[in-house]
Image: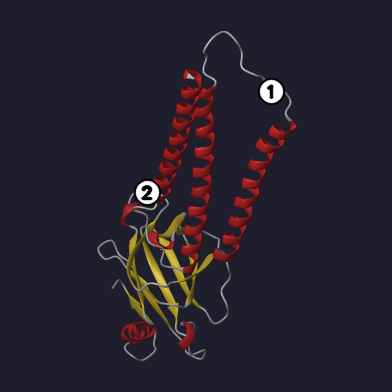
Amino acid sequence: MAVTGFRRQMRRSVLLLAVALVALASIGVASAQIGTPKPITDEARKIEDLWIFTLAIAAVVFVAVEGALVYALIRFRKRNDELPAQTHGSTVLEFVWTGIPVLIVIALFTYSFIVLRDVENTAAAEDMTIEVQGFQFQWQFTYQMNDLGVNADPSASGEISVIGTAADEPTLVIPIDEPIEFRLLSNDVIHSFYIRDFLYKLDVVPGRDNRFVITARETGEYFGQCAELCGLNHALMRFKLKVVTRDEFDLWVAEQTGGTGDSAVRRAD
């Protein structure tokens, strides 16, 4: 009777421990998102979904491994000099601990490939392209007047160029709900174009034409920076991102050009 009661108590303890581990894993998944930036683009939301999916799998693996370890420590703890029942060459166990990791790797690879394909998509001919020039130690953003998105005039000429200085950080202005292609260029060293709320960054490499496309879904002001140590004043390579409506963007373009459509160069906003 005493042995039966002890075993029942042990089962309850193991069950409570398993529940606690599951709860701990759930809290871990939730707390991992606290303090992380809110994704403001379609691509960022897909990246966040992949992150949560990967974290959830990691939590399940953690609970399973730690639960099995704790169970083995309690269930098979040494009571006397007799060995517990031994299992050798179990085909079922071999399939289980080989098959589960393979399935996890396949799931992660497949989902990651799908997200990577969606994030690293190419721009359509009608999409706006903004040239981003990284230099020691600031940024230059150039808009072509004949390539301003849905309201672009193919016959327009000239450009808008916003150049940052050490004293004034430049502002990158883009319209909401429109695909925007960033073309990244550098004439000196490697920089890295990083906007936290994009959940994405891409290196700016001399001699290489790197590009990526985003579609912003949230208006507001955000912050960007160079995320690659590029020299003594690397910390000064900050800039602002302003996501506005299409009407506000058209008004901004008119303000930059004085309403004439001619080229305009601004040291900073």
At 36% from the left and 86% from the top, the residue drawn is 247
Q: Which residue is mark 2?
A: 31
Residue closer to the observer: 251 or 63 = 63
From the top left corner, tell me how far across and down residue 8 is, in percent.
48, 28
User: Hey, what amino acid is under mark 1?
Assistant: Thr
User: Between 178 and 99, which is closer to the camera in this rendering?
Assistant: 99
Q: Amino acid at mark 2?
A: Ser
Q: Which residue is mark 1?
A: 87
Residue closest to the eye, 133 or 73: 73
User: At 71% across and 22% down in the image, what residue appears?
Assistant: 88
- Secondary structure at numbered mark 1: loop
Res. 203 in view: no
State the count of labels.
2
* Helix, strand or loop status at disc 2: helix
Q: Nearer the viewer, mark 1 or mark 2?
A: 1
- As displayed, is residue 66 above or below residue 178? above
Report the residue that reaches farthest toward the front.
Answer: 1
* Residue 171 place in picture, x, y as percent: 33, 70
Contact between labelled residues 2 and 1, with CB atoms less than 8 Å apart = no
Of mark 1 and mark 2, the one earlier in the sequence is 2
Residue at the left extreme of this rendering: 167
Colour scheme: secondary structure
